[in-house]
Amino acid sequence: MSGHSKWATIKHKKGALDAKRGKIFTRLIKEITIAAKLGGGDPDGNPRLRSAIAAAKAENMPADNIKRAIQRGTGELEGVSYEEITYEGYGPGGVAVIVDVLTDNKNRAVSEIRHAFSKNGGNLGADGSVSWMFTTKGVITVAKSDVNEEKITEIVLEAGAEDLSEQGENWEILTDPKDFEAVTEAIKAAGLKTETAAVTKIASTYTKLEGAQANAMIRLLDTIEDLDDTQNVYSNFDMDEAPVAG
């Protein structure tokens, strides 16, 4: 588990996500739109839409934006038609990378992603080449300073969490995707704030890189993150925090 948390910490320290607030909103709107398109506009009967709305609210997205995204998905408002695609590949040192894309132009998406890989010492792989290494889990973090171990254990296990571990200054809670919402709600109901909460992919093993390879891997992940069509990027990359501290 350490690699997953370490990379999340690195990303947070670099401030990459904070600097891309507009990009976060764009991704959330696309996710709400496709969720409504595939499962209907009622969040009560559409778990994916419910999760997307919860994520949007966590980023303080205005209710009007959420409503319009749902209406574009259900066809009440005109909008762009998105296609969901997942690409798999390898970064420097054989690191496994999965990229979830929502695009209105498949040719552009694959061309940009292939270019990002090849420019940064990686290459695109075939479907299934790396996905077998990953499991989809809900991951929630809560600051240790907010709650002791006994209390957080009681809250999350009762709500259906699978695992609780210490990760630096946080408690990290793992859930089955279907229990993610219930566990998140139980934490909030107890008056606690989540530092992060997302359904994500976690690797079974991690590949540690150092020096030039680690820097090339960071560049690859940043390049892919910056593409307009990218929704999520997962990898089994691990490194020491020193190269990007601060």
Image: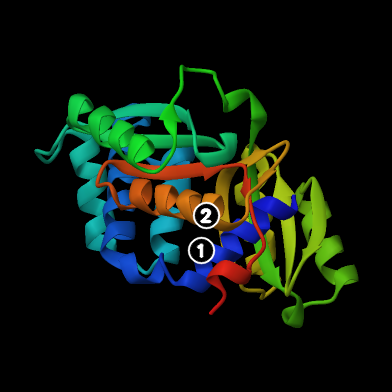
Left or right: 35 as drawn, with respect to 244: left
- First in sequence: mark 2 or mark 1? 1
Q: Amino acid at mark 1?
A: Lys
The spot of residue 21 in percent (x, y) is 32, 66
The spot of residue 24 in percent (x, y) is 34, 58
- Displayed quadrant of residue 168: bottom right
User: How far apart are labels 2 and 1 at the CA level?
Assistant: 18 Å
Q: Residues within 10 Å of mark 2 (few under 14, many from 20)?
A: few
Residue at (50% x, 38% y) in the render: 91
Front residue of 92/160: it is 92
Q: Is residue 177 above or below residue 181?
A: above
Q: Secondary structure at mark 2?
A: helix
Which residue, as the protein is rendered here, is positioned at the far right? 150
Q: Secondary structure at mark 1?
A: helix
The spot of residue 88 in percent (x, y) is 46, 28
The spot of residue 191 in percent (x, y) is 66, 75
Q: Amino acid at mark 2?
A: Ala
Q: Which residue is mark 2?
A: 212
Left or right: 41 as drawn, with respect to 217: left
Residue at (53% x, 80% y) in the render: 246
Residue at (29% x, 31% y) in the render: 37
Front residue of 227/238: it is 238
Q: Which residue is mark 1?
A: 11
Which residue, as the protein is rendered here, is positioned at the far bottom? 145
Front residue of 181/83: it is 83
Residue at (31% x, 35% y) in the render: 113
Which residue, as the protein is rendered here, is positioned at the far front? 212
